[in-house]
């Protein structure tokens, strides 16, 4: 049994033909009971469900939404509730009011729409700031001086999230894998931007697609000890290439 934990946007999506090809191979493995498919995404659950219905994404077994602050397991319907133990654990360390206070007075900062701002995730855009990287550093500095209960996720030169320190994509996958008694060395993660970095910290096998942002490529380069595969191809074709490399398709179903 392999566990593939992949980001969606820009990692699986971006080229429909290659997604169709990968999706059919992943469905084959899932149906043979050889794959557990997890999406780890910044999307909301209904956007993931729409992606399965309309964008050709294969049906997953679990979905980590809002950058790992919400965990959903099958059956994945629009009425599904996030896993309560995870939510309660994170709520104990997070105060949205406090998180918002770290953003005060940053010139050019714009809050993301309310659907991406939850009781466990405070998200804004910094691409309107005179120097977005400096603004992200300033927010990170403010938080680090004050507490270790939060983590800052900086992606794509635009998105900044303040999350509970115990959350994020990597920790959410680990929580799920341990809870289900699965082997961490059978996990392969895949991503394209900064909010995927924590997956590569938690797990040794990872695929970075060719269209990845420099922030993730540089981060992957700096990791010691892991086996990160930098794909030659972009989007789903790159994920497929990486899964080939790790031997995920070397089983009876493929
Ligand atoms: C997704 C989320 C957004 C977040 C970004 C980076 O785009 O929708 O809220 O800021 O990922 O983590």
Image (spheres, rainbow, N blue to C red):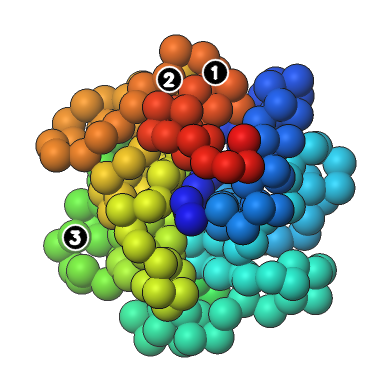
- The crowding category of the residue bearing disc 3, from other C-alpha atoms within 10 Å (few below 14, some 14 to 19, many at least 20), is some
- Residue under numbered circle 1: 234
Tag 3 or tag 1, which sits nearer the N-term?
3
- Residue under numbered circle 2: 231
Asked whether the beta carbons under mark 2 and mark 1 sit within 8 Å of each other, the answer is yes
Figure check: 81 above or below 187? below
Whether residue 30 sits left or right of residue 212 in the image: it is right
Cα distance in 3D space between marks 3 and 2? 34 Å
Cα distance in 3D space between marks 2 and 1? 7 Å
Name the residue nearer the viewer: 91 or 251: 251
What is the total number of numbered labels drawn onto the structure image? 3
Name the residue nearer the viewer: 57 or 183: 183
Q: Quadrant of residue 146?
A: bottom left
* Element marked by disc 1: loop
Name the residue nearer the viewer: 144 or 184: 184
- Give the x, y percent position of residue 233: 51, 14
Figure check: 3 above or below 164? above
Residue 245 appears anywhere in the view: yes
Mark 3 residue CB less than 8 A from any atom of ligand 1: no
Image quadrant containing the C terminus: top right
What residue is drawn where x is 19% and y is 60%?
144
Figure check: 79 above or below 51? below
- The crowding category of the residue bearing disc 2, from other C-alpha atoms within 10 Å (few below 14, some 14 to 19, many at least 20), is many
- Give the x, y percent position of residue 51: 77, 45
* Element marked by disc 3: helix
Whether residue 171 sits left or right of residue 222 in the image: it is right
- Residue under numbered circle 3: 144
């Amino acid at each position: 049994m392999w566990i593939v934990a992949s980001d969606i946007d820009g990692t699986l999506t971006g080229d429909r033909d290659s997604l169709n090809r990968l999706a059919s191979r992943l469905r084959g493995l899932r149906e043979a009971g050889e794959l557990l498919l997890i999406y780890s995404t910044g999307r909301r659950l209904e956007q993931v469900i729409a992606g399965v219905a309309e964008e050709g994404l294969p049906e997953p077994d679990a979905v980590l939404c809002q950058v790992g602050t919400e965990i959903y397991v099958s059956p994945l319907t629009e009425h599904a509730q996030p896993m309560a133990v995870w939510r309660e654990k994170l709520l104990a360390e997070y105060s949205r009011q406090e998180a918002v206070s770290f953003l005060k007075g940053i010139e050019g900062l714009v809050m993301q729409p309310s659907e991406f701002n939850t009781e466990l995730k405070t998200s804004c855009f910094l691409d309107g700031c005179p120097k977005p990287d400096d603004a992200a550093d300033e927010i990170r500095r403010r938080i680090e001086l004050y507490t270790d209960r939060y983590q800052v996720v900086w992606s794509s030169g635009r998105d900044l999230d303040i999350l509970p320190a115990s959350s994020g994509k990597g920790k959410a996958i680990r929580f799920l894998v341990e809870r289900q008694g699965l082997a961490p060395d059978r996990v392969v993660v895949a991503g394209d931007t900064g909010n995927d970095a924590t997956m590569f910290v938690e797990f040794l096998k990872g695929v970075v697609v060719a269209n990845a942002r420099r922030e993730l490529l540089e981060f992957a380069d700096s990791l010691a000890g892991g086996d990160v595969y930098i794909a030659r191809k972009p989007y789903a074709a790159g994920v497929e290439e990486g899964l080939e490399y790790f031997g995920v398709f070397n089983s009876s179903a493929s």
